[in-house]
Image (cartoon, rainbow, N blue to C red):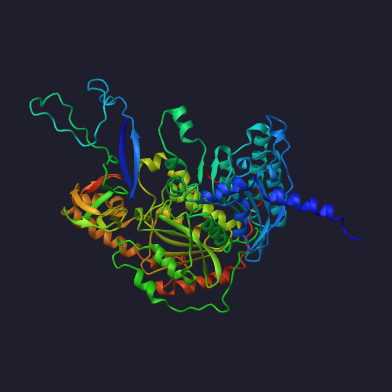
Amino acid sequence: MKKLRVTVEGKVYEVLVEMLDDAGTSAPSPASAPVHVAPVEAPAATPAPVPAPVQAPAGASGPGDVVSPLAGKIVSIDVKVGQSVNEGAQVATVEAMKMNTYIFAPKSGRVDSILVNPGDGVEEGTPLLRIV
Amino acid sequence: MAISPALLDELHKRRAAATAGGGPEKAAERKKKGLLTARERIEILFQPGSFLESGMHAEHDCHHFGLEKKSFPGDGVVTGVGYIDGRPVACFAHDFTVGGGALGRIHSKKVCDLMDYAMESGMPLIGINDSGGARIQEGDDALSGYGQIFFRNVLLSGVVPQISIIAGPCAGGAAYSPALTDFIIMTKKNAQMFICGPEVIKAATGQTTTMDDIGSAAAHASISGNIHFVADDDRHAFAIARKLLSFLPSNNIMDPPHKPTPAVTMEHDERMNALVPEDPKAPLDVLKVIELLVDHSDFLEVQKDFAKNIVVGFGRIQGIVVGIIANQPAVKAGTLDIDSSDKGARFIRLCNVFNIPVVTLVDIPGFMPGVQQERGGIIRHGAKMLFAYAAATVPKITVIMRKAYGGAYLAMCSRDMGADAVYAWPTAEIAVMGAEGAVNVLFKKEIAAASDPKKKAAQLAQEYREKFSSPYEAAAKAMINDVIEPAQTRGVVAMALRNSLSKRETRPPKKHGNIPL
């Protein structure tokens, strides 16, 4: 079981995710120790046997992630890394169904990282940027 | 000759014992927790001194598990009729101080008697729920009591408005009585509603969860969609109930409380023109449109935290009560998805049973695309919108503000689905699909063969848009009544409503239609 925090339309939910059979045969069981969502750096000496970091599925996001509420195309990221934003400030614009959907900051903070570029296609739940 | 003082004395003593409920200690305990008693709640809900109680002297009749030695004044529920805005309203309130407000045979008989009375007299019913559930000592008598209440909830449905206030625990089967009513108002704190609690979920499935996640007002308002209003506290919940009733008739054969202005004004409101963005891709906040459309910006939004891509609620337009159903382009592009279809369709049917005219504001690019939507049954859920509109015989006025594409256009009460009047703004785009998608189908070969396919596609799309992305093609085919300036909307809708108030429509007799559920 993995404990994840998901932000949907500005609301934070804590969910438990059970990993079914992937990595169940060869990789060590992930259930035995608390697992952090952030990919762990591979030890320098043993590059080969470490399982590649699994591509985060749409919807899996960390604390502070601002996610897309619907599938679409990024029109613009309306903030810069390092910029401080207030709760409710417009941070990104996604185009879907011939309409621009504005994405607003779910909380006040500083923009820590931007995870997508204008023109990228995103799924519902794809993290767009992170506010800390 | 006068009545014997001893008899009066006995009556007063019995009344005092009954109205004390579970006794002064339990009442003090509630006060300490900041909770109101059943009788205090009723006092606040109704016009002062207007409540006429019935069944005050009722007692349980259970002879098992030591209950024969216990007294339950009123059997844990207060029932009667009080007045709101000069209109009688039936009400029951669980008394948590009496055996946890649990339901037994006599308790349920009191509630059922009240419901029968409300139905026969054509008055709304408000239930204030705060109960531990079934009185287990009474066994299947308690179960049967719930069944009889559910049965009456269904009998009353569509006859009188039923409002449930959840002001305490409401668990297991007990949650289905509110679920069968028209509106559920739930207080933020101290109220929980669920079928299986966290412990049962853990034992049965191993899933760990919290009461907040599954049973709180916030979860039900925004995720499950089970409730319609979140109240800060009891007083706020009663204020919402009174406000709701101010838009509803007492029963299905009465008109809603219209307060028609003596004359309809057709004044232009330039603020509405100013709301419409030049760029068709820029979202329009439909709540701002509604604010300008209804009298005094007084709009009671229903289920405002759930499926926000559709906005539903009550208001008056030059005095006429209306139910408004509006796409919200600012959320999920205003698409219809599973949740917004359910929300919209149920509201349309509520308006129809209580003779409330429906005003539909359209700006919809289509149904929400997605695997989850298709696999989740968007076909049957979206069909509810079509069914609800077509089945509604109340006056139906539709304003097409901007996009109205494909099946979703029909699902927002087009002329073909029975709208009595359809008006379109000059920004309206009524088409079977978007221009880009359409030319890719129509001119696939021409585009592929062109030296610059992208340019060719854009050029063809522009031609298609000029033809269909305006209201005039639809107006030429008499699919809409008129093209109006946004500034004219309030006046034109008000006039159209007045014109159709005497609408009468007959349908083939049948038990009921078979709405896709």
Report the front residue among B34 and A84: B34
Choose top left, top right, bottom left or bottom right for residue B98: top right
Q: Is residue A73 left or right of residue B182?
A: left
* Residue drawn at the location 30% of the way across and 47% of the way down: A71
Choose top left, top right, bottom left or bottom right for residue B202: top left
Q: Where is residue B118 in the image (x, y as percent from the top left)?
A: 69, 54
Choose top left, top right, bottom left or bottom right for residue B475: bottom left
Please, which residue is most extreme toward the left here?
A: A45
Where A52 falls versus B369 (above or below)? above
Q: How many labels does the image show?
A: 0
* Residue drawn at the location 19% of the way across and 32% of the way down: A53
Q: Where is residue B313 in the image (x, y as percent from the top left)?
A: 49, 60
Which quadrant: the N terminus of chain A? top left
Q: Where is residue A36 in the image (x, y as percent from the top left)?
A: 24, 34
Q: Is residue B419 left or right of residue B471?
A: right
Report the front residue among A1 and A99: A1
Please, which residue is most extreme toward the right here?
A: B1
Report the front residue among B289 and B450: B289
Report the front residue among A75 and B84: B84
